[in-house]
Image (cartoon, helix red, strand yellow):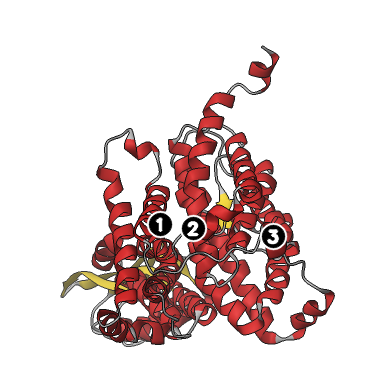
Amino acid sequence: MDRVRTFPYLRQDFAASLVVFLVALPLCVGVAVASGVPAELGLVTGIVGGIVTGLMRGSSLQVSGPAAGLTVLVFEAVQSFGLPALGVIVLTTGLLQVGMGALRLGRWFRAISISVVEGMLAGIGLVLIAGQLYAAAGVDAPVSGTGKVTGIPGLLVDAVSSPAALTSLALGACTIALVVGWSRMPKRVRAVPGALAAVVLATLATLAFDLPVETVRVQGLLDAVQVPALSEFGGLATLSLLGTIAAFTLIASAESLFSAAAVDRLHDGPRTQYDKELIAQGTGNTVCGILGALPMTAVIVRSSANVQAGARTRASRVLHGVWLLLFAALLPSALALIPLPALAGILIHAGWKLIPLRSLVPLWREHRGEALILVVTAVAIVTINMFEGVLIGLALSVAKAAWDASHIKLEVVDSSPDGVRARLSGNATFLRLPKILDSLEALPDDRPVSLDLSGLHHLDHACRTALENWAERHSSSGTEPVRLTRDDVVTTAP
């Protein structure tokens, strides 16, 4: 009876934790392999995300772990700085997140343009899909994002003439088809997550038919953990490493807090406390950095599975971390049976879901500027790299905000021999001063003018002075003084 009072939702949380565990297991392994690190490090991050971050306050039902959204960035960092430096990068990222949360900066990440975030995810998705096509064929992918995309036709041509590559690609394609079609299966069957079912069936097919495909390399949980040496921290003096850390911090924080906002819409429980959630994410990344593991973010796939499975408290996500720990400790050899093309198929599907195709067309119709920011950010990430692509997106969003803030319109309401009634609306700032003056000077100077300023949301000092000077010049031409109206106050030019 006391247990029921202490944990009133234990049954619901226990059942939800098993579902989240089954969803997280193939993704943890797949993200690690795609990131170019041992598969066990993905499990370590999942364990830390469940047990450490899961115990902390912030978002009660959000689940954290290694995310497909950081795969490209982690792969580039490992290629550039080496696997030992990954711990330093993730540790520093975590400390920065804790600091930003303590300074109550978590809520400011919500001010980042959604188009930049969606463009970032779309770019990551495109690079992830292109890179995993090579993994599905069992060949090494080009280093650059552009090389990955442009090399796909050659990859497919070469695969046709190679039985091993064709078999590997076919297994990956079957995995994708199974994941996509899993939602149409009977409800009882769908109790098993589609990604897990696809990996298990691909593994059984590989064993049954002795398919010539590569499988996951296993080296043991403790052997995979690499505590960063003190010498690795010397890299913090280099600008390139600091830029990578900044990209990790920005992307991991934004993705986690945007995920929290999405998860809040899925349930009617306690709302996310953004600053505390940022501290929780930072604490988890700090621990992951100490263990030399992958960075973590909140993951919407696991979080939505947690909510849909009926989770009520933080206990579900903590228990899912416990199940990952038990699997990694008791059944590590099972990882060696998983075929890499199956994991590549899972990540290709995950990359496809990162691309907001359904929302892009309506966005283009209603807000072309935002759609352009999304597309340019995605293309920049593919053609240049992650960090510069995000910076380009942020710069474009700031430029668009400045343009929108300075938007102004002059409308002639009535024009007759007795006078002209005109109305200014929008934001009158110095950025649009030339347009304002050109429009005003185009008004007839031989008739009285009544200018309504009540439609202005903002009127800065430069524009106010320019309006007064124009009104004075217009009145000196022999016509009646210009009447300026704003908020029911009428002023007359001298």
Determine the image quadrant of residue 10.
Answer: top right
How much space separates mark 1 and mark 2, taking CA atoms?
8 Å
- Dot placed on the residue nearer the N-terminal end, 3 or 2: 3
Of 161 and 491, the residue lying toward us: 161
Of 448 and 486, the residue lying toward us: 486
* Amino acid carrying mark 1 in the image: Leu
Residue contact at pointers 1 and 2, CB within 8 angstroms? yes
Which type of secondary structure does the marked residue at label 1 adopt?
Answer: helix
- In which quadrant is the N terminus drawn? top right
Q: Is residue 317 left or right of residue 337?
A: right
The x, y position of residue 431, in whole percent, is: 45, 82
Which type of secondary structure does the marked residue at label 2 adopt?
Answer: helix
How much space separates mark 3 and mark 2, taking CA atoms?
26 Å
Task: Answer above or below: position of 413 versus 478.
Answer: above
Q: Can residue 408 be seen at all in this image of the molecule?
A: no
- Mark 2 packing: few (<14 Cα in 10 Å), some, or many (20+)? some
Q: Which marked residue is nearer to the observer: mark 1 or mark 3?
A: 1
Q: Residue at x 71, y 63 (%)?
A: 223
Residue wearing tag 3: 288
The x, y position of residue 374, in whole percent, is: 38, 71
- In which quadrant is the C terminus drawn? bottom left
Q: Is residue 477 left or right of residue 1?
A: left
- Mark 3 packing: few (<14 Cα in 10 Å), some, or many (20+)? many
Q: Which marked residue is nearer to the observer: mark 1 or mark 2?
A: 1
Q: Residue at x 60, y 66 (%)?
A: 38
Residue wearing tag 2: 337
Q: Residue at x 60, y 53 (%)?
A: 332
Residue wearing tag 1: 207
